[in-house]
C-alpha cells in the first residue's frame, strides 16, 4: 500500500493529482477511484492510501484511494 497527499483536485472534472510520499512522480486519479462514502469531497493536502493502476490510455494512475 502506498501513501500520498492530494496536490490538486478539480471538482468540475472530477479528477486530480496525488503526490506520493515516496518521492515518485505525481499520479492522476479520478473521483471514481475514491473509496469512501458520504459527502466527503477530496481536498488538497488530504493524506490517502492508494494503489497504482492503469487508466484507459494505459498510463499509471492512483486507484482505491482511502483516507490514511
Image (cartoon, grey):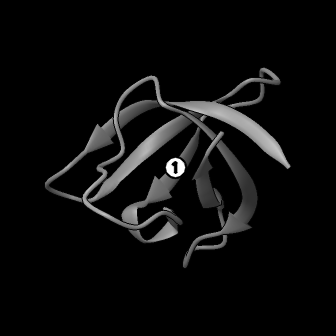
Which residue is depicted at the point 43% across and 71% down?
Answer: 32
Residue 65 on image: x %, y % = 59, 56
Q: Is residue 54 above or below residue 7?
A: below
The residue positioned farthest toward the left in the image shown: 12
Q: Nearer the viewer, residue 15 or 39?
A: 39
Label 1 neighbour load within 10 Å: few <14, some 14-19, many 20+: many
**Residue name at image x 24 percent, y 45 percent:** 10
Image coordinates for residue 18, horizontal then vertical, percent: 55, 37
Query: Looking at the picture, how far across and down is residue 1, in whole percent?
Result: 86, 49
Return the residue at label 1: 28
> Which x, y percent locates residue 9?
32, 40
Q: Would residue 51 appear left or right of 7 to someone viewing this image?
A: right
Depth check: give the residue in front, 7 or 39.
39
* Snapshot quadrant of residue 2: top right
**Residue, x 50% and y 55% (percent of image)?**
29
Up the image or down, 21 lies above or below 33; here it is above
Left or right: residue 13 versus residue 68 is left
Residue 44: which quarter of the image? top left
Amino acid at each position: 500500500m502506498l501513501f500520498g497527499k492530494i496536490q490538486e483536485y478539480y471538482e468540475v472534472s472530477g479528477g486530480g493529482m496525488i503526490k506520493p510520499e515516496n518521492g515518485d512522480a505525481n499520479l492522476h486519479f479520478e473521483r471514481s477511484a475514491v473509496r469512501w462514502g458520504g459527502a466527503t469531497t477530496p481536498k488538497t493536502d488530504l493524506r490517502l492510501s492508494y494503489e497504482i493502476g492503469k487508466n484507459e490510455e494505459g498510463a499509471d494512475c492512483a486507484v482505491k484511494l482511502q483516507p490514511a
